[in-house]
Image: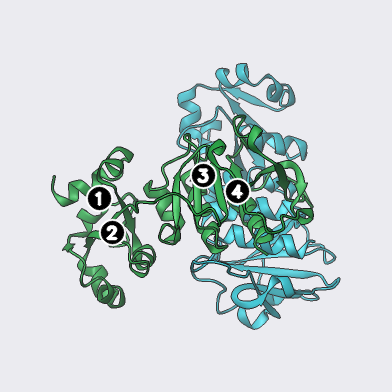
Chain colours: A cyan, B green
């Protein structure tokens, strides 16, 4: 398979899994990958991109690269229009998670934009261990990667888990019927924050494992908050 | 123009402005519109939808309706696949804003998904007056409406403004260089919260009008938070 065909194949989960690689795009994500010393196996860019971004080009000069046309890069890009730079990057191999650090658990999250925002928000608040249930979308899906804006490179552990495997944590579920986050006191206990999907909420199978439900006070109107917004507010309080 | 052509024309800002109407889709948004007594001028639905949603059908029985095929509703829907119900709804006429209530000001926000999340989050926190600068996306754009999930019907004032026209408010700008939201005390003063776009932030032209910059503490890593997430955290603190 030639390199461009390979990049295109990585749009599919099957090939990402087989090759243990994924695609990142754009100045910002590629910048984050380099800063984090992520293993970029191949870089594609256009002449136009390199002329307009000498700073980035300086940082990628030791990475194997191919200069391709705009038409070619748009063809291998998962976006409608490529920004002119795209890389194939190794998926990190993780050992087991660190039991002294908190965890976000994603319960059947299927929307790629939401998952990307979740990853970006989690790392902002220093929560860099992310577990997901078997029904969740692949975190290396190109749309997730795009909306995560480089967060993948600040994650210390990411993997599929079942809640019942997690021991020694206080397991919190985000649910509108829960106690207000303002009144929650978790002391120094390590916690797992379980986030359910929109609009279904926490799954049936996760309920038996939840120790406490927590919620965000509704001051005005509406059925719910966006899941990324909810998690942001919960993490803001939990990490205070 | 026949009714289906008219619905399709409302995908464009020009026709929304001319007709003073916009499109809403799906159970949830249409339910919110009915609850808020919004003026729905015409409803389209499929037989399949009506058979599976007798509860909604009961609530819309006095609204002028057309039963159309799946193919037809997909053709007039701004979504890739219609959920089977779509309505044409009047855009509310607003007088001037209420000077005793807080305001969100959107400074050149152009991403429709972000704007929808912003509206949904604002009304959750009881902030129902939304101003936007001249460069912002139309809040009645179908993608904005979809991601706002009915928030339009809980807004008491929405309009284009310039920051310099707003008097008698404390004007706060969301900016990573600002003071941490945890240490902000706004007493009982009414405020305007100005949100800039990703990744540009607050515009040059808004800076002279900002009284205070406020920020969200970064516990971990990343360049920024998503704008909807940021605003959610700021409103959570400001409305406490």
Q: Nearer the viewer, residue B44 or B155?
A: B155
Measure how far apart labels 1 and 3 are at the Cα level.
30 Å
Look at discs 4 and 3 and give the one toward the viewer: 4
Residue for point 72% across, 75% down = A171
Q: Which residue is mark 3?
A: A11
Measure how far apart labels 4 and 3 are at the Cα level.
43 Å
Same chain for the residues under marks 2 and 1 in the image: yes
Q: Which residue is mark 1?
A: B76
Label 3 SS: loop
Label 4 SS: strand
Q: Is residue A126 above or below residue B222?
A: below
User: Given the current orientation, which residue lies at the most extreme bottom position?
Assistant: A208
Q: Which residue is mark 4?
A: B192
Report if the CB atoms under discs 2 and 1 are less than 8 Å apart.
yes
Look at discs 3 and 2 and give the one toward the viewer: 2
Q: Give the x, y percent position of residue B5.
A: 18, 46
Please give the chain letter of the residue carrying mark 3. Answer: A
Residue for point 44% across, 62% down = B154
């Amino acid at each position: 398979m030639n390199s461009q065909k390979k990049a295109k194949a990585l749009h599919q989960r099957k090939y990402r899994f087989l090759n243990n690689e994924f695609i990142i795009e754009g100045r910002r994500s590629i910048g984050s990958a380099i800063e984090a010393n992520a293993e970029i196996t191949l870089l594609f860019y256009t002449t136009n991109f390199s002329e307009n971004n000498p700073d980035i080009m300086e940082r990628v000069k030791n990475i194997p690269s191919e200069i391709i046309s705009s038409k070619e890069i748009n063809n291998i890009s998962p976006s409608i229009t490529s920004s002119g730079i795209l890389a194939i990057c190794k998926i990190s191999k993780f050992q087991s998670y660190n039991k002294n650090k908190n965890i976000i658990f994603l319960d059947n999250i299927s929307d790629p934009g939401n998952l990307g925002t979740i990853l970006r928000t989690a790392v902002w608040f220093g929560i860099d261990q992310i577990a997901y249930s078997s029904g969740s979308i692949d975190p290396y899906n190109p749309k997730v990667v795009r909306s995560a804006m480089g967060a993948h490179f600040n994650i210390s552990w990411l993997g599929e888990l079942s809640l019942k495997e997690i021991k020694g944590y206080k397991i919190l579920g985000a649910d509108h019927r829960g106690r207000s986050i303002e009144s929650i006191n978790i002391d120094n206990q390590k916690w797992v924050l379980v986030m359910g999907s929109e609009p279904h909420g926490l799954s049936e199978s996760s309920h038996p494992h939840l120790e406490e439900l927590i919620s965000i006070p509704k001051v005005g109107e509406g059925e719910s908050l966006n899941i990324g917004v909810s998690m942001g507010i919960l993490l803001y309080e939990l990490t205070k």
